[in-house]
Image: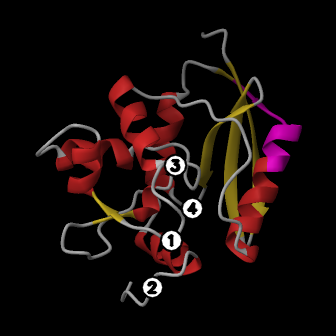
Amino acid sequence: MSDRVLNFFDYLIEDEWWRIGALNGDICMTMPLGAAVAMKKIERRFRSWNRVEARSLTTDRMAEQINEFLTMGRRGFDVDVFMVGTEFEKMVWRELMRVEYGQRISYGVLANRCGLCGGARAVGGAVGRNPLLLLVPCHRVVAADGSIGGFSAGIDLKRSLLSIENNHGMPW
């Protein structure tokens, strides 16, 4: 087992259960439990870690901020983040964090910003493995033709998140 300890707790936020995890006070996981396939992939990332189900000030604060995002128009998050992924994934996620609230980006444009001309599929894979839903705003990535594209936590949630961010009249 790893000497890393994942402190996690499940919170009911706007009629949806969210699992929020932290490592040494840094958020490393935010995911709705209803996204079963995505949750299984994320849980695999942390399988070698010691896991403790317990609330903390950090996870409580994150839950509060997710609630504010979903209900009151919070545009950003004020928490420290610890990314658990490959160096490639982290590079993609850091670039994705630069996409501002209410904006959209295609997989191809995101790949180009990462210096990967023609790397849209590889970037799409990294986006789909994001364990930090909302903090790393993977819901802002759309297909090249402007259609909604896929979403590891479910298309309905993606539509809802895009709507929250004022989708500028786009037919999501």
Q: Amino acid at mark 3?
A: Val
Label 4: which residue?
34
Give how far across and how far down residue 169 sits, in percent.
42, 90
Q: Secondary structure at mark 4?
A: loop
Which residue sits at x=37%, y=49%? Answer: 128
> Nearer the N terminus, badge 3 or badge 1?
1
Pick whichever, 139 or 13, lies toward us: 139
Pick whichever, 152 or 98, lies toward us: 98
Give how far across and how far down residue 161 sits, in percent.
54, 72
Q: Nearer the viewer, mark 2 or mark 4?
A: 2
> Nearer the N terminus, badge 2 or badge 4?
4
Q: Which mark is residue 136?
A: 3
* Distance (Cα) linking label 2 and label 1: 8 Å
Q: Nearer the viewer, mark 3 or mark 2?
A: 2
Which residue sits at x=21%, y=41%? Answer: 122
Label 1: which residue?
102
Which residue sits at x=37%, y=48%? Answer: 127
Q: Nearer the viewer, mark 3 or mark 1?
A: 1
* Distance (Cα) linking label 3 and label 4: 19 Å
Give how far across and how far down residue 83 sits, in percent.
54, 31
Q: Secondary structure at mark 1?
A: loop
Q: Secondary structure at mark 2?
A: loop
Label 2: which residue?
168
- Whether residue 168 sits left or right of residue 145 in the image: it is right
Q: Amino acid at mark 4?
A: Gly
Which residue sits at x=76%, y=57%? Answer: 65
Residue 52 position (above or below residue 17): above
Give how far across and how far down residue 56 sits, in percent.
86, 37
Q: Based on the picture, tell me whether residue 62 belongs to the magenta stretch.
A: no
Q: Amino acid at mark 2?
A: His
